[in-house]
Image: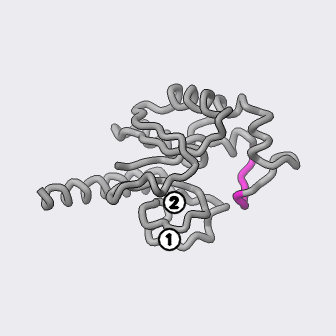
């Protein structure tokens, strides 16, 4: 199964806060980013979709999500997902993502501090460019769509030969 992270991949919460951070632990107007969002919760529903979600919405691909959200962000986040995602699938709210992945699963992510990226395609952001990757870094929506269709085709072929 293919899973997507939400913020930084599908929802442009940084853009809503009017920043393009070079570091993961960034500040907005002198306030730590997460604290800023807590005091401006309307951004959770007002944020625009990223260019990646726009492309995914044009495809027929089901969008399954694994996201780490503070409890107070969950309801506005669900509202945002229902408003902005055309083909919403499974949604998992969990701070620990990699252990949730099964052997043939893939996670599309922007987080720069995982210990293992073997099942992760990284959306290129300024704050994650130091990651050493086994896979290609995703730099455009069309590249993401191509990689996902390739992944699906490979998984289908594997299941055909394993039956």
Asked if the magenta segment contains residue 85, the reply would be no
**Which region is colored magenta?**
18-24
Q: Position of residue 59 (x, y in %)?
A: 37, 40
Q: Nearer the viewer, residue 140 or 103?
A: 103
* Label 1–label 2 contact, CB within 8 A: yes
Q: Eyeballing the image, is 35 above or below 134?
A: above
Please name the predominant secondary structure of the magenta segment in the image.
loop
Q: Which residue is denoted by mark 1 in the rendering?
A: 133
State the residue at coordinates (86%, 46%).
29
Left or right? Give the position of 31 relative to 59: right
Q: Is residue 146 visible?
A: no
Residue 54 disc label: none
Q: Position of residue 99 (x, y in %)?
A: 46, 56
Q: Position of residue 130 (x, y in %)?
A: 62, 71
Q: Secondary structure at mark 1?
A: loop
Q: Eyeballing the image, is 37 above or below 159?
A: above
Q: Quadrant of residue 13?
A: top right
Q: How far, Cα to Cα, is label 1 from label 2? A: 8 Å
Residue 122 disc label: 2
State the residue at coordinates (51%, 52%).
97
Q: Nearer the viewer, residue 111 or 147?
A: 111
State the residue at coordinates (47%, 47%).
4
Count the labels in the image.
2
- Graded by Cα atoms within 10 Å as few (under 14), some (14 to 19) or many (20 or more), the crowding at tag 2 reads many
Q: Eyeballing the image, is 55 above or below 154?
A: above
State the residue at coordinates (37%, 57%).
147
């Amino acid at each position: 199964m293919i899973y997507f992270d939400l913020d930084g991949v599908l929802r442009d919460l940084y853009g809503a806060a009017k920043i393009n951070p070079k570091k993961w632990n960034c500040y907005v107007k002198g306030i730590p980013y997460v604290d800023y969002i807590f005091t401006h919760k309307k951004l959770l529903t007002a944020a625009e979709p990223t260019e990646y979600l726009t492309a995914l919405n044009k495809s027929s691909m089901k969008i399954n999500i694994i996201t780490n959200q503070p409890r107070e962000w969950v309801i506005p986040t669900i509202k945002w997902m229902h408003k902005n995602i055309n083909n919403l699938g499974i949604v998992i709210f969990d701070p620990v993502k990699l252990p949730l992945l099964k052997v043939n699963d893939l996670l599309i992510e922007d987080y720069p501090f995982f210990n293992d990226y073997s099942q992760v395609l990284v959306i290129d952001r300024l704050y994650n460019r130091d990651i050493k990757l086994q896979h290609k870094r995703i730099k455009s929506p069309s590249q993401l769509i191509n990689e996902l269709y390739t992944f699906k085709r490979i998984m289908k072929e594997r299941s055909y030969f394993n039956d």
